Image (cartoon, rainbow, N blue to C red):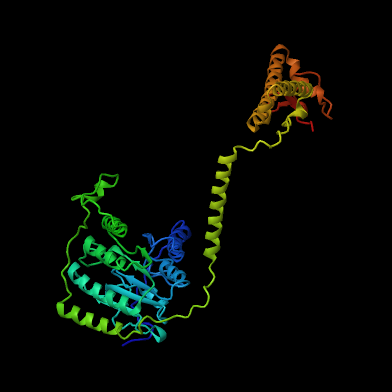
Amino acid sequence: MTSELPNARPDFSIEDCPRFPSLYDFCQLYAGGSIEGAWKLNQKRTDVAINWAGGLHHARKSEGSGFCYVNDIVLAIIELLRYHPRVLYIDIDIHHGDAVQDAFYHTDRVMCVSFHKYAPNFFPGTGSVNEIGHKEGKHYSVNVPLKDGIDDTNYLKMFKPIISDVMEFYRPTAVVLQCGADSLRGDRIGNFNLSINGHAECVRFVSSYNLPTLVVGGGGYCIRNVSRCWTNETAVLLDVDLPFDLPDNEYFAHFAPDFKLQNTGMEAENQNTRGYLDSLLTQVRKNIRTLQHAPSVQMTAIPPSLYDDIMDNMDEDEEDKDANEEYLRETGPDRSMPRSPPRPNPTAEFDGGAEERSSTSNTNNTNTNTNTNSHDVAAKEDATAAMDADDDRGASTAAAAAAQQAKHQQESQASPTAQMMDVERYPSPTTTNNNTNDTSDANTTPITNFRGQVFDQGCE
């Protein structure tokens, strides 16, 4: 048997991981979802975590592969290993989970079990039954290479005995289940004959062991079947029965012609003979039974994780927010806030005499508010009334400015020379011509500010 890391891979030198806008954000979202799911399992915040966007099992540490950019499965398993001595990885995608196997090929802390198609020139070209692991990881890689056309009955006859043996001999404390939907009948790349119910039965069987489980997606190249499959398996994990007829929705037309919770597509010829499957099952179970029963791991300290600090800070923020809301409900608004100071007039330097009129108006308005508030002590203590009074002072200032603007417009209509009012108030250093029809000197050409008042370009 081959125990070394398999290096003889077919040459699939195609650009299967193209760049696209927001690629980093995409990788961050799906990989972060799997890591957070593993973290919640570690913290016992959930029994089952699902990330259908994850399951990209071909990506390697230094390169993308097979439409996979970042291997979220490996990252999630590393997070699980901080608390769990043994993690079981199960892959029911039609493609071999090569990069996950290679990441843990030399350790007994992770056992990888993959059920996949194995044929010449089929990606990724790995997954022979002889790939069993190396050194401490020998016999902890279990590969079940299948041929085209396998159906529900034969698939489950392989799946259930092998997983039962793994559970008995390896005794995992956590499970990661990759549910690639390209092993369904009708997929554009895969060529198996699994139904949605047969695929979901694998999920149901694994969940029956009641272990902390992270469920991720994977391949799938018929979107109608993928959405049916993962919807059904979400219901299986939640122990919910779904109707066979699909409900009306905005994507209803995509599920024609039957509109049922079942995958569609042509069946392929089953090339898995009874003799081949029996021989394969015997060999795989023999390898499993050579394992050390539940290998122990000495864990003296839990390795640090940046994710703990991030989530702890998020929890503290939520607790502070809840405590603050509870305090406000009990005590009401804060009545000790000081009154806001009057707002300054930003156009005072262009206002001249209007500034004094606005100041007088503000003073009168403030006195009026003070007299009014002196007759109502409760309103004076109320922060809301203080904010209203401040708004009234701002409104008074705005009213005075509007009155001044209207006055200037009337003067401009009454006398053309009134347009030079601010020019005379702020004389230009340049000698001006008293003839208003002479516009030869650009420095004396009046312009208006945003309130309609006239001032000279030469003013500072």
Q: Residue furthest front?
A: 330
**Placement of the N terminus among the 4 image quadrants:** bottom left
Would you place residue 48 above or below residue 157 in this image? above
Instruction: Work out whether residue 351 can be spotted.
Output: yes
Would you place residue 393 above or below residue 53 in this image? above
Does residue 431 appear to the left or right of 64 in the view shown? right
Does residue 443 appear to the left or right of 58 in the view shown? right
Identified at 70% across, 34% down, the residue is: 340
Quadrant of residue 368 in the image?
Answer: top right
Quadrant of residue 398 in the image?
Answer: top right
Q: How many marks?
A: 0
Identified at 23% across, 60% down, the residue is: 196
Residue 244 lies, in percent from the top left, at 21, 52
Q: Nearer the viewer, residue 157 or 103?
A: 157
Residue 240 lies, in percent from the top left, at 28, 55
**Placement of the C terminus among the 4 image quadrants:** top right
Residue 93 lies, in percent from the top left, at 30, 68
Q: Nearer the viewer, residue 91 or 447?
A: 91
Would you place residue 293 above or below residue 372 in this image? below
Quadrant of residue 330 in the image?
Answer: top right
Would you place residue 7 above or below residue 236 in this image? below
Instruction: Work out whether residue 450 can be spotted.
Output: no
Q: Nearer the viewer, residue 384 or 217?
A: 384
Residue 211 lies, in percent from the top left, at 36, 68
